[in-house]
Image (spheres, grey):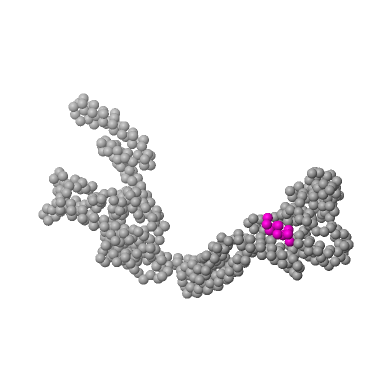
């Protein structure tokens, strides 16, 4: 509607019917009325009623006859009194200006439905006392009517301000009592609408205040609806209490900030950071920005100290990593565990300890499991604190040490499992199918334990010792698919069997599929190493197959080519597939020709070229 009104005003100005100032005055008044929530009269009607334009000028500008009041409805507006009029008339102007927040209110339609207009006064007659009272009272009625137009009291703050301004401007008038009564009734209605919120406030306020839980009390006060803060007596009380509690928290913040600064001066950034983090819950909004700056300062100081402590711990762990791996390569899990215990129990500073130990791990119980030696207990406690990670770079020094301790315990359990299975097999002469020694059984002979192959051959331990695969077979004999047992076997190959990355990867991958923890971190590196080793073996076998094919030892060449074809999807196999197929075709063709010639000549045949 505003754009249409501007267009109409522009036409009237071009006709010379009115001025730009007159158009702006009406449009500005209507805009303020809309902001107050009241529906203003149509633009053309107001222009006509104020006498700025005539009916014929509006019709000429395009206004429809039906949008204008009939000639009978048109009434002359009251003329303003002369400059020397009664002082009481000036008082009415003050009432209107102050009572309605600075807006000029007309006798009709200011806040909603038209109200009775004030008396039509002549140009010189002064207003009587009765006329002044009636005129002021009509505006009091309009304010009350405006207050009732919003069911959720959205107009409440403005209404209360209007009432109070009206009363201040009219102090001493006989209808001031009526204004106070209406204001009290209005606040009472607002209080009844806020009953649920007030009851919730009263229910929790006392306990929080008595226990000094100011942060929770502040949150409770802030839950009180803002629209009732200025319109109800309870709201004004809550507003005051909000200021009181906020001031308490500001005072607490000042004390906490001083304590943080003292901790920084004492060189305790970790304690200062913990204190700052605790302050976040109790700091009022008025100090949030200051808290943000304080935390940034503490974190900057803390990072410097923490980085130094982290590097010192990492350097210390690097020194014990060599002795640890040496003990593991000798399959001595107990010795490897002692190396790690020495690292864990070193006299660490408070800022270093955070990088040595993992949170929520029972280190006291862990250290007690060394005497007497209990690798199962150590493995259990360590495994619970080992995080799942696919990359070693994501593990801190403390987590890496805990993982290494778990692995040392696993090595000890693996070797114990192997020894138990070996002793049981020797005592029972149980038939075995060892990967290295073959099918047979152990037995005692001449004071030594030998392995008797199924064919009767006796293998001495000096000339035919158990291999790495035999160790894994015996250790897993009772539970070959146990995920934890597979993890122990994989770590056995990882630490104690050089150049067996492929086997370590195989066992650890099976353990990971079965749900074992703390093994994924090794699979990435082992997978790459196993892939490199497989490629090297395939290349070696292909070269040997080519040499045997050229020298006429085709059965051996065929066997090697068959080994390569067991990995059909490997990039190397794909790259040499045409050469493999050509050699296999020539080998088959040569075999068929040799069989035919052997049948014909009754003797061994060697085909040379064609």
Direction left: furthest residue: 446
* Residue located at (76% from left, 47% from top): 4
* Residue stretch in magenta: 140-149
Q: Is residue 515 visible?
A: yes
Q: Nearer the viewer, residue 276 or 13?
A: 13
Residue 392 horizontal side relative to residue 433, left or right? right
The answer to if 141 sits in the magenta stretch is: yes
* Residue located at (63% from left, 61% from top): 190
Place of residue 387 in the rendered image (x, y in percent of width and height, measured from the top left): 38, 57
Place of residue 109 in the rendered image (x, y in percent of width and height, measured from the top left): 76, 54
Q: Nearer the viewer, residue 215 or 595?
A: 215
Direction top: furthest residue: 600
* Residue located at (33% from left, 67% from top): 364
Q: Is residue 300 visible?
A: no
Measured along the vertical axis of the image, is residue 18 above or below residue 560?
below
Q: Nearer the viewer, residue 147 or 459?
A: 147
Residue 327 horizontal side relative to residue 448, left or right? right
Residue 355 horizontal side relative to residue 43, left or right? left
Measured along the vertical axis of the image, is residue 261 above or below residue 70?
below
Main secondary structure found in the magenta portion:
helix
Place of residue 563 in the rendered image (x, y in percent of width and height, measured from the top left): 30, 40
Q: Nearer the viewer, residue 448 or 133?
A: 133
Place of residue 515 in the rendered image (x, y in percent of width and height, measured from the top left): 34, 51
Residue 156 horizontal side relative to residue 464, left or right? right
* Residue located at (70% from left, 55% from top): 37
Image quadrant in which you'd find residue 592: top left
The quadrant the C terminus occupies is top left
Image quadrant in which you'd find residue 586: top left
The answer to if 425 sits in the magenta stretch is: no
Measured along the vertical axis of the image, is residue 259 above or below residue 77?
below
């Amino acid at each position: 509607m505003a754009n249409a009104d501007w267009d109409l005003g522009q036409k009237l100005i071009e006709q010379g019917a009115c001025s730009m100032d007159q158009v702006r005055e009406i449009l500005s008044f209507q805009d303020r009325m809309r902001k107050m929530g009241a529906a203003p009269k149509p633009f053309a009607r107001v222009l006509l009623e104020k006498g700025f334009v005539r009916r014929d000028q509006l019709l000429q500008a395009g206004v429809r006859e039906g949008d204008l009041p009939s000639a009978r409805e048109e009434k002359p507006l009251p003329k303003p009194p002369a400059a020397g009029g009664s002082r009481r008339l000036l008082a009415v102007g003050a009432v209107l200006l102050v009572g309605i927040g600075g807006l000029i209110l007309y006798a009709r339609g200011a806040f909603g439905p038209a109200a009775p207009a004030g008396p039509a006064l002549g140009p010189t007659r002064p207003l009587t006392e009765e006329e002044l009272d009636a005129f002021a009272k009509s505006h009091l009625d309009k304010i009350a009517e405006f207050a009732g137009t919003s069911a959720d009291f959205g107009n409440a703050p403005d209404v209360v301000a209007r009432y109070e301004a009206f009363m201040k401007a009219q102090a001493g008038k006989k209808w001031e009592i009526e204004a106070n009564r209406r204001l009290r009734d209005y606040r009472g209605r607002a209080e009844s609408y806020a009953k649920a919120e007030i009851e919730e406030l009263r229910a929790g306020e006392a306990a929080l205040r008595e226990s000094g839980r100011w942060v929770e009390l502040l949150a409770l006060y802030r839950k009180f609806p803002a629209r009732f803060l200025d319109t109800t007596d309870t709201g004004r009380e809550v507003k005051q209490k909000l200021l009181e509690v906020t001031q308490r928290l500001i005072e607490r913040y000042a004390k906490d900030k001083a304590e943080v600064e003292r901790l920084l001066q004492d060189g305790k950034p970790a304690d200062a950071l913990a204190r700052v983090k605790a302050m976040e819950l109790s700091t009022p909004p008025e100090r949030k920005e200051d808290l943000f700056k304080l935390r940034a300062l503490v974190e900057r100081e803390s990072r410097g100290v923490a980085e130094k402590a982290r590097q010192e711990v990492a350097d210390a762990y690097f020194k014990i990593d060599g002795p640890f791996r040496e003990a593991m390569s000798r399959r001595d899990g107990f010795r490897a565990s002692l190396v790690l215990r020495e690292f864990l129990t070193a006299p660490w500073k408070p800022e270093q300890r955070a990088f040595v130990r993992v949170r929520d791990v029972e280190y006291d119980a862990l250290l007690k499991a060394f005497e007497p030696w209990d690798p199962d207990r150590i493995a259990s406690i360590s495994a619970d604190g080992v995080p799942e990670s696919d990359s070693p770079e994501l593990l801190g020094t403390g987590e890496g040490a805990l993982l290494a301790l778990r692995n040392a315990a696993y090595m000890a359990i693996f070797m114990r499992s192997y020894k138990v299975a070996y002793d049981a097999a020797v005592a029972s002469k149980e038939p075995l199918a060892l990967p290295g020694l073959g099918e047979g059984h152990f037995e005692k002979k001449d004071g030594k334990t030998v392995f008797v192959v199924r064919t009767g051959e006796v293998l001495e331990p000096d000339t035919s010792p158990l291999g790495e695969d035999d160790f894994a077979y015996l250790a897993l004999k009772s539970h070959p698919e146990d995920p934890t047992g597979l993890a122990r076997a994989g770590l056995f190959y990882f630490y104690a069997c050089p150049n067996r990355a492929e086997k370590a990867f195989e066992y650890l991958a099976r353990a990971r599929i079965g749900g074992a923890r703390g093994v994924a971190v090794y699979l990435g590196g082992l997978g790459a190493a196993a892939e490199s080793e497989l490629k090297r073996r395939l290349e070696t076998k292909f070269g040997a197959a080519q040499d045997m094919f050229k020298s006429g030892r085709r059965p051996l060449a065929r066997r090697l080519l068959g080994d390569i074809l067991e990995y059909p999807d490997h990039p190397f196999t794909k790259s040499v597939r045409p050469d493999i197929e050509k050699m296999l075709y020539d080998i088959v063709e040569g075999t068929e020709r040799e069989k035919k010639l052997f049948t014909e000549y009754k003797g061994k045949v060697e085909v040379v070229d064609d």
